[in-house]
Image (spheres, rainbow, N blue to C red):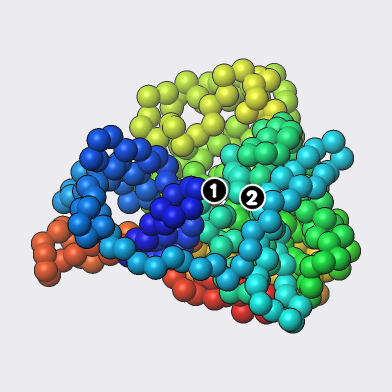
Amino acid sequence: MINFDFTNDKTTYDIPEIGYMDVIPERISKSKDTLNVKIFYGDFYCMLNPETGEITGVSKDVKPEMRIHLKKTGIKEKSFTEEQIRFTNNDISLSGLLFKPKKTDQPVAYVVLVHRSGWEDRETPWYHSLAYILASRGIGVLLYDKRGTGKSTGNFSQADFNDLSDDAASAFNYLKTRNDLNYSKIGFLGASQGGWLVPMAANKVSDPGFAILVVGPAVSLYEQDINRVQYTLTDEGYSKESINSALDYSRFFFKYIESNKVKDWAALQKKASEIKGEKWIDYLDIPQSQTGEDVLWWRKNKYDPKEALSTIKCPVLSILGEKDVLVPPAENINKMKTYLTKAGVKYKIVTIKDCSHDMITVSKMNVGEENWPQKYWHWQKQPEEFVDSITEFIQ
């Protein structure tokens, strides 16, 4: 099911099955009698029936063609309000949205959402949708534009993990200053890279209520990248020989990153020349110079979450995806248990079946090739267990 909202200043759409709510289309335009809208499922060309108000459209991005048929419904009422906010971390000005549940006389929990890697702001579909869903369930949410994105100042590509966790801690401290908010507790939720940052941020503030790590690694940054190479190439069907060759290169890469020695750079260059032309080379980091931005980034962010997880002082929920090739459960669960046991806090680790890194199930044919009706396509889906686990843990 797809819902569009054309009533506000901005067009948004929902695909509840994959957890997309109140998302801005990638593109929307109108030319004569045709509406072009690009969303998660593809690039649709639509026609409006002026008599019925219904919209029909087709996307030719996939075979067989995907069609939509939209019918008019009532206006969607939100169970929360959205407030534009601004707070600071030293000289960095951070801007975002505060989702405040309506009609409650009881204190509510608030959660600070902490970003993944790359460009992410308040309109990033995954995070905006999660904020919308949690607020709809009576949980307050602070969703800020990562430094250097949206309306926030700074530059996330020049920041290290310490800087980014300081931003999250500043968001927490901002909520603490809001005497008008009837909050019961304030915690953090971070996904992927945010799962590394959340324990750091939680250890920088007083009285954190909880920490939720969605596909957050328990291994070091270097280990995670080696796992990424191994599990991704395995998932792509490459031979054991190819995988071992790629892993061998990765070990040479990190040896040079750590040592910064001329001899290790020469060895890395030799290794890179040996694998030149391999189909899987794009999965690897091949630096063009000894002091390139990629090399400096890895050095600046040599990080292991062991200490932060072993000393955290609040309850922790760790959610992993069974099919995640970036943060594979097999490489992370035992370390997560060991560190959180040492911390002496309540914790829960959940592995959600069939989910990949984005907490959406892997789409696939039920068996073999397409042959309707015996064989059919399983659509991607965000399991209810994902959001249920988060809300139950917070509450």
Residue 367 seen: yes
In the image: residue 193, left or right of residue 186? left
Q: How far apart are the two marked residues, 2 and 1, measured between alpha carbons? A: 10 Å
The percent coordinates of residue 267 (x first, y second) are 59, 23
- For the point 34% across and 44% down, which residue is it? 37
Q: Which residue is mark 2?
A: 115
Q: Secondary structure at mark 1?
A: loop
- For the point 64% across and 38% down, which residue is it? 149
Q: Secondary structure at mark 2?
A: loop
- For the point 38% across and 50% down, which residue is it? 40
Mark 2 or mark 1, which is nearer to you?
Answer: 1
The percent coordinates of residue 342 (x first, y second) are 79, 70
Label ID, residue 375:
none
Residue 149 to residue 134: above or below: above
Q: Are marks 2 and 1 in contact (CB under 8 Å)?
A: yes
Residue nearest the observer in this picture, 78 or 357: 78
**Mark 2 vs 1, N-terminal side:** 2
Q: Give the residue type that dot 1 points to.
A: Thr
Residue nearest the observer in this picture, 242 or 135: 135
- Which residue extends farthest front? 51
Numbered marks: total: 2
- Rendering quarter of residue 312: bottom right
Q: Residues within 10 Å of mark 2 (few under 14, many from 20)?
A: many
In the image: residue 317, left or right of residue 382? right
Label ID, residue 124:
1
- Rendering quarter of residue 320: bottom right
In the image: residue 251, left or right of residue 158? left
